[in-house]
């Protein structure tokens, strides 16, 4: 049965990818049927992909039969509930349809499958949230304080979340189908060409002179490749199988090697030009041009990766690891540079198509075409061009997983619109924070870390913005900066314990403890938690809002100084090992130089420079540099 299910997954996933390409080329086929059928096929792919027989393997045939029986019941519920929705939708829109008990039972069956598949694919957090929002709608009259509302019966709830375009089949579904699927397919096709391994080889060669060696190469390669990947875990696994063993071979600890890959792969999701395709969703949500969004995201992303580079350099110094001897460094050939076109040409195509005024879907389509054509530069692709068919299936399966999360988010969005929960939540944040922007941002950051746990970037961004975005905008922060703030913390949730999905993906490759890997990733990317706040309080960093050259240069200098102070404090080493008091002072001064008060900035800078001078006079007691 497992073999048959693999074939079914392959066929359905390939179908999803082909429809994504068609949609990017010619537009939505039929809005009602494409929404409903995409959700249906995605759920079926998820059922087979995470079937009970696969997850809970057993040799007992009776138990196996029971497992498959449960999954086939779920498939039956999917087919029945989606068919039911499609058949009655026109009458529902006319307002002449009278709900019957059968409608409610079938709709509840569909919701049950969505929630169960969300649990299987992404764990309990999102599934539990969806359940709680449904309970909130039904039991609102019993709730106290700001959360109380008149309550809604089951028919009203089902009309919203299942039998309309306000819930499971809502606007997010059509955005993902028309904008995001094509970029997921593009990423899968690009990976199949071998562009990732070529990019890694170039990164290793260019960073060979640095004592971090392969760790620095991993940061560069994961950042480049991560920007076109909509899934952090896929990026970790795709590049980590190459980078992590090399990092370990240079003498870095297992957990550190995994942490570097997790932190670098996560950062790719907010690295222009593609930002894991979240930039296109943001443009659709905010109405702000794509070019403006990637321009605003550029400097924060560069500083994030700058912090990672410094953190690796510090750790290499602490361990006494030196750069790779020149005679042993990777030598790039003309063929390597030609192969690099497999990555750079499609990315240039994306930018060129978007700058020309065409849609993001068109950019994704032409980038996919360019990626396939350029892929034939690789002799391995010329020998086995059928790898593109398998890449279609892989991309389609990733699309299906995203759609499962989007369907669950549709439940939450539908209930929030029905009950006004989003407005209540915003009011609650403002009630707690008052007019204190910093406190409101902290609440938003914490909520983003919690709500984003275990989710791919795009679903995490959507759910956080819908729930939290309005509150911060009411405090006068530009809409785009709020959305970028949400993206950063949604992405950072992938390396934040206890869930830390990026670290958990890297840990088995590194043969390290997942929690230790997550802690290392958290330390390495510690400056990433500062940068979003700096962006809000210093809009010049965005290169778009309130840009003044003096303000821009000021924040660049102060942020660079803060990153050096905090990163060396976290690593415990500068030119020499740092005593505990110096590490504490560095963190405190790193925060001080970023405060909005000019007096604090000047005082912090002076104190920091004095501390750096004093620490530079310490005797260098770092292990002798060694080659592994």
Image (cartoon, rainbow, N blue to C red):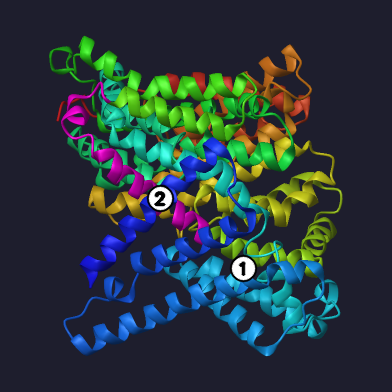
Q: For the point 64% across and 24% down, which residue is it? A: 291
Relative vertical location of residue 69 with respect to residue 25 in this rendering, above or below: below
The tag on residue 492 is none
Q: Which residue is mark 2?
A: 396
Q: For the point 56% across and 35% down, which residue is it? A: 361
Describe residue 623's horizontal placement relative to residue 519 as left or right. Answer: left
Is residue 271 visible in the rendered image? The answer is: no
Q: Quadrant of the C terminus?
A: top left
Q: Please say whether residue 377 is one of the residues in the magenta stretch.
A: yes
Q: CA distance from mark 2 to mark 1?
A: 23 Å
**Residue 131 vs residue 5, the one in the foreground:** 5
Describe residue 523's horizontal placement relative to residue 277 as left or right. Answer: left
Crowding at dot 2, Cα within 10 Å, few <14 / some 14-19 / many 20+, comes out as many
Q: Quadrant of the N terminus?
A: bottom left
Relative vertical location of residue 449 with respect to residue 556 in this rendering, above or below: below
Q: What is the magenta range?
A: 376-404
**Residue 401 vs residue 226, the one in the foreground:** 401
**Residue 293 vs residue 443, the one in the foreground:** 293
Q: Which residue is mark 1?
A: 86
Q: Residue furthest top?
A: 334
Crowding at dot 1, Cα within 10 Å, few <14 / some 14-19 / many 20+, comes out as some
Q: Position of residue 321 (x, y in %)?
A: 24, 27
Mark 2 and mark 1 lie on one chain; the one further toward the N terminus is 1
User: In terms of secondary structure, where does tag 1 sit?
Assistant: helix
From the image, give the main secondary structure of the stretch colored magenta. Answer: helix
**Residue 602 vs residue 487, the one in the foreground:** 487
Q: Please say whether residue 204 is one of the residues in the magenta stretch.
A: no
Relative vertical location of residue 54 with respect to residue 39 in this rendering, above or below: below
Q: Position of residue 492 (x, y in %)?
A: 52, 46
Q: Position of residue 319 (x, y in %)?
A: 26, 33
Figure quadrant of residue 251: top left
User: In terms of secondary structure, where does tag 2 sit?
Assistant: helix
């Amino acid at each position: 049965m497992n073999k048959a299910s693999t074939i079914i997954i392959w066929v359905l996933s390939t179908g999803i990818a082909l429809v994504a390409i068609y949609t990017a080329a010619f537009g939505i086929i039929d809005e009602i049927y494409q929404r409903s059928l995409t959700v249906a096929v995605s759920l079926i792919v998820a059922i087979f992909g995470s079937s009970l027989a696969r997850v809970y393997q057993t040799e007992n045939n009776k138990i196996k039969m029971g497992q498959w029986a449960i999954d086939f019941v779920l498939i039956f519920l999917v087919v029945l509930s989606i068919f039911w929705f499609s058949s009655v939708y026109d009458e529902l829109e006319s307002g002449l349809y009278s709900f019957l008990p059968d409608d409610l039972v079938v709709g509840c069956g569909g919701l049950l499958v969505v929630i169960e598949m969300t649990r299987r694919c992404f764990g309990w957090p999102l599934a539990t949230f969806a359940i709680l929002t449904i309970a909130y709608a039904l039991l609102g009259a019993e709730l106290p304080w700001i959360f109380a509302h008149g309550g809604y019966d089951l028919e009203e709830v089902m009309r919203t979340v299942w039998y309309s375009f306000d819930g499971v089949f809502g606007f997010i579904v059509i955005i993902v189908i028309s904008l995001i699927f094509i970029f997921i397919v593009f990423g899968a096709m690009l990976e199949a060409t071998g562009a990732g391994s070529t990019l890694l080889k170039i990164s290793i060669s260019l960073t060979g002179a640095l004592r971090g060696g392969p760790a620095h190469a991993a940061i560069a390669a994961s950042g480049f490749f991560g920007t076109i990947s909509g899934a952090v875990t896929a990026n970790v696994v795709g590049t980590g199988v190459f980078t992590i063993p090399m990092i370990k071979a240079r003498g870095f600890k297992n957990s550190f090697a995994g942490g570097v890959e997790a932190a670098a792969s996560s950062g790719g999701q907010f690295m222009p030009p593609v930002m894991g395709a979240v930039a296109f969703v943001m443009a659709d949500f905010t109405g702000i041009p794509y070019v403006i969004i990637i321009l605003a995201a550029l400097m924060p992303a560069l500083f994030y990766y700058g912090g990672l580079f410094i953190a690796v350099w510090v750790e290499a110094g602490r361990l006494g690891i030196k750069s790779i001897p020149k005679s042993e460094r990777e030598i790039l050939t003309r063929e390597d540079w030609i192969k690099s076109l497999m990555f750079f040409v499609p990315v240039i195509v994306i930018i060129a198509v978007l700058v020309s005024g065409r849609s993001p879907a068109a950019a994704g389509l032409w980038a996919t075409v360019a990626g396939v054509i350029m892929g034939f530069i690789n002799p391995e692709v010329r020998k086995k061009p059928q790898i593109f068919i398998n890449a279609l299936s892989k991309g389609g399966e990733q699309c299906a997983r995203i759609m499962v999360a989007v369907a669950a988010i549709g439940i939450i969005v539908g209930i929030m619109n029905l009950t006004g929960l989003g407005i209540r939540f915003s009011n609650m944040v403002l009630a707690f924070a008052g007019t204190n922007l910093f406190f409101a941002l902290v609440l938003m950051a914490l909520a983003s870390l919690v709500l984003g746990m275990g989710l791919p970037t795009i679903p995490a961004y959507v759910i956080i913005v819908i729930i939290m975005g309005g509150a911060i905008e009411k405090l006068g922060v530009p809409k785009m900066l709020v959305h970028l703030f949400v993206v950063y913390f949604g992405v950072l949730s992938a390396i934040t314990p206890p869930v830390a999905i990026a670290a958990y993906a890297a840990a088995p490759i590194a043969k390290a403890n997942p929690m230790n890997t997550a802690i290392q990733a958290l330390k390495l990317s510690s400056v990433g938690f500062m940068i979003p706040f700096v962006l809000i309080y210093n809009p010049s960093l965005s290169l778009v809002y309130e840009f003044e050259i003096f303000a821009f240069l000021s924040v660049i200098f102060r942020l660079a100084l803060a990153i050096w102070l905090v990163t060396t404090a976290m690593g415990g080493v500068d030119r020499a090992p740092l005593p505990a008091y110096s590490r504490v002072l560095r963190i405190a001064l790193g925060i001080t130089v970023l405060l909005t008060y000019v007096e604090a900035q000047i005082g912090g800078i002076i104190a920091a420079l004095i501390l750096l001078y004093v620490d530079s006079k310490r005797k260098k007691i770092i292990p002798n540099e060694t080659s592994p």
